[in-house]
């Protein structure tokens, strides 16, 4: 285990509804994948501030055969290229390809993807920001010991109105840009 004082700084983001527009019909192609205003610059700002930016995303559209691994890879290549063009970098994108009833350990609200990211980077998840727009994102972060952060984009406004009591004290921001600015400011103050 890496000493937490020398460990890399990690941020975990959900994808749909946080970085890009979500769809009840699923985002099935690179053409359908549309970044939310300010999200790409927010990722770049986290990256240039010294954070390793990672993404953990449920992608049950794979299990439902709405798109294939090649289409998902094209979406993620588009995302990474936009972030690089903005001066940032995404360390890793991890997805759960399973359906809601598959009983896996990776699908949020379970914390398997987050634990894997922490293990891969040798980072204890305590206080690692995990930004999401749904209750399952917040629950996965909480279970993993990470710091759940809610954004109001995507399903976030609905989630905010329906937070369970144990999550009422979490940080809530209008969008990823505001959350990223707060994360960078908090990290600067802690240094």
Image (cartoon, rainbow, N blue to C red):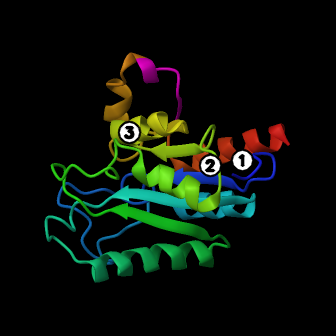
Depth check, front residue: 58 or 16: 58
Find the distance from the CA under tag 1 to the CA under tag 2. 6 Å
Q: Is residue 95 above or below residue 191?
A: below
Q: Of the residues under marks 3 and 1, which one precedes in the sequence? A: 3
- Quarter of the image for residue 83 reads bottom right
Q: Crowdedness of circle 1 by 10 Å Cα count: few (<14), some, many (20+)? A: some
The answer to whether 164 appears left or right of 176 in the picture is left
Measured as percent of width and height from the top left, residue 146 is found at 55, 39
Over which residues does the magenta segment extend?
166-172
Crowdedness of circle 3 by 10 Å Cα count: few (<14), some, many (20+)? many
Relative depth, front residue between 181 and 9: 9
In the picture, measured across the screen, residue 97 lies left or right of residue 167, that is left
Q: Are marks 1 and 2 in contact (CB under 8 Å)?
A: yes
Q: In terms of image quadrants, where is residue 157? A: top left
- Whether the residues at callouts 3 and 1 have beta carbons within 8 Å, the answer is no
Give the residue displayed 82% in from the left and 38% down from the top: 189
Q: Percent position (x, y) of residue 77?
A: 45, 80
Q: Name the residue tied to disc 2.
A: 180
Tag 2 or tag 3, which sits nearer the N-term?
3
- What residue is pinned by disc 3? 156
Toward the right, the furthest residue is: 191
- Say which of 70 and 177 sits in front: 70
Work out whether residue 37 can be spotted.
Answer: no
Mark pair 3, 1: CA separation: 21 Å
**Residue in the image at 38% along x and 29% along y:** 160
**The C terminus, quarter of image:** top right
Magenta stretch contains residue 167? yes
Residue 184: assigned label: 1
Image spot of residue 36 (x, y percent): 44, 58
């Amino acid at each position: 285990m890496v000493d937490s004082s020398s460990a890399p700084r990690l941020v975990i983001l959900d994808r749909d509804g946080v970085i890009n527009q979500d769809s009840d019909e699923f985002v099935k192609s690179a053409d359908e994948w549309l970044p939310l205003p300010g999200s790409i610059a927010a990722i770049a700002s986290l990256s240039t501030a010294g954070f390793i930016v990672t993404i953990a995303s449920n992608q049950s559209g794979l299990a439902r055969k709405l798109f294939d691994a090649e289409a998902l890879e094209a979406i993620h290549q588009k995302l990474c290229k936009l972030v690089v063009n903005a001066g940032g970098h995404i360390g890793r994108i991890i997805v759960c390809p399973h359906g809601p009833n598959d009983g896996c350990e990776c699908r949020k609200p379970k914390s398997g993807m987050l634990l894997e990211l922490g293990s891969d980077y040798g980072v204890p998840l305590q206080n690692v920001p995990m930004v999401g727009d749904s209750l399952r994102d917040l629950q996965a972060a909480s279970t993993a010991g990470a710091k759940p952060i809610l954004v109001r984009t995507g399903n976030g406004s609905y989630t905010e109105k329906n937070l369970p009591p144990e999550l009422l004290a979490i940080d809530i921001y209008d969008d990823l840009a505001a959350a990223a600015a707060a994360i960078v400011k908090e990290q600067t103050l802690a240094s």
